[in-house]
Amino acid sequence: MVRYIWQSSSWPCFHWDSMVLLLPLGKARKAQGEILAKAAYFELKSEAEVLIEEAFTTTAIEGETLKRDSIRSSVARRLGLPTAGLPAVERSVDGLVEMLIDAVHRHDVPLDVARLKGWHAALFPSGFSGLRKIIVGSFRNGNEPMQVVSGPIGKEKIHYEAPPARILNSEIKRFLKWFDSPPGGLDGLVRAAIAHFWFVTIHPFQDGNGRIARAIADMTLAQDENKNCRLYSMSAQVMAERASYYHVLEMTQKGSGDLTPWIVWFLECLERAIRRSDKEMQKSMDKARLWQQFSLLELNDRQRKVINRLFEAGPRGFLGGLSNLKYRGITKTTRETAKRDMADLVAKGILVKNAVRGRSSSYELVWPR
């Protein structure tokens, strides 16, 4: 009885409805084009923030929480950014970051079995997944079925059962052959969706398959864009939509080979991931424009700190505006110093006084055009 897609006689001859894909594919391509147009403004530091978010969320999807400071330390070290004040790097975190960087920065290097096993070994340097000892840097073996389950012991729900270990080598070989030489005319974004689904469906390792599948998707997207830096975090968006991610994955894995629902979900999620990152990139560009506008003005550290805080809060982000009390709370200075600082910012056209309400005065940031 066929219960899962890999048991079908047509596996892995996937098919999809191209007409259904036209709209989500067009939207994803439009969003991708817009963010690529801004890529010239994208700095190494900004890429680091995307990479930190990717590392944090790709593990959170699987229910594991890493320390952001440890991720930040590993990313900074590997991208050549300052590491002063950051904690020591944990081996497992460093391995994850290494895999994520390798997938995108070396997207033009062929994906092979050795590289997949190297990624897996980097994810589990201790040989353990939590408290469980696992086979590291090798495909799973034995006759025990690999199942994706949820629920308490004794009441588990089986969501998926992967192909048996005895056929893994041939399955991976077929996948890598397709990945290296995809059919002509296959859209790069659709290829990323298929690659993600196909690998996680084979499920060749005891653990870490989801993380590696998402790294493969990132690598595919980097090949499509021909860029070796991260402009957006797909994993962050998948994490935000984790329930629907697992639902459509399970539904498609129990299907007959029609990947239309999965590809549509992937493309729509990708578009939202790009839009989300585009907002952050625009914010960074606006901030750079803000400081460029103020570059010739003499400002002290307190004033700079307050301007940054106002910018991060956004227009009308400070309820009631910036008051003397709030200024002192941010800068830890005296009432008179705060009064002088704010008066100076008003004189320089950086702050504008709100209409008088009550006894105290409040101010707003004059946003750059």
Image (cartoon, rainbow, N blue to C red):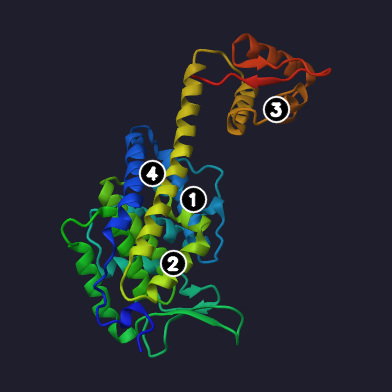
Farthest residue, direction top: 347
Which is nearer the N-term, disc 3 or disc 1?
1
In this figure, which residue is indicated by the disc labeled 2? Answer: 248
Q: Position of residue 122 (x, y in %)?
A: 40, 65
Q: What type is the residue that disc 3 sits on?
A: Thr
Which is nearer the N-term, disc 1 or disc 2?
1
Which is nearer the N-term, disc 4 or disc 2?
4
Badge 4 element: loop
Mark 1 and mark 2: Cα distance apart in space: 23 Å
Mark 3 and mark 1: Cα distance apart in space: 29 Å
Q: What type is the residue that disc 2 sits on?
A: Val
Image quadrant in which you'd find residue 12:
bottom left
Q: Which mark is residue 53?
A: 1
Q: Position of residue 68 (x, y in %)?
A: 55, 52
Q: What type is the residue that disc 4 sits on?
A: Leu
In this figure, which residue is indicated by the disc labeled 4? Answer: 231
Circle 1/circle 4 CB separation < 8 Å? no
* Residue appearing at x 15%, y 58% in the figure: 184
Total labels: the figure holds 4
Which is nearer the N-term, disc 3 or disc 4?
4
* Comparing labels 3 and 1, the label whose residue is closer to the camera: 1
* Comparing labels 4 and 2, the label whose residue is closer to the camera: 2
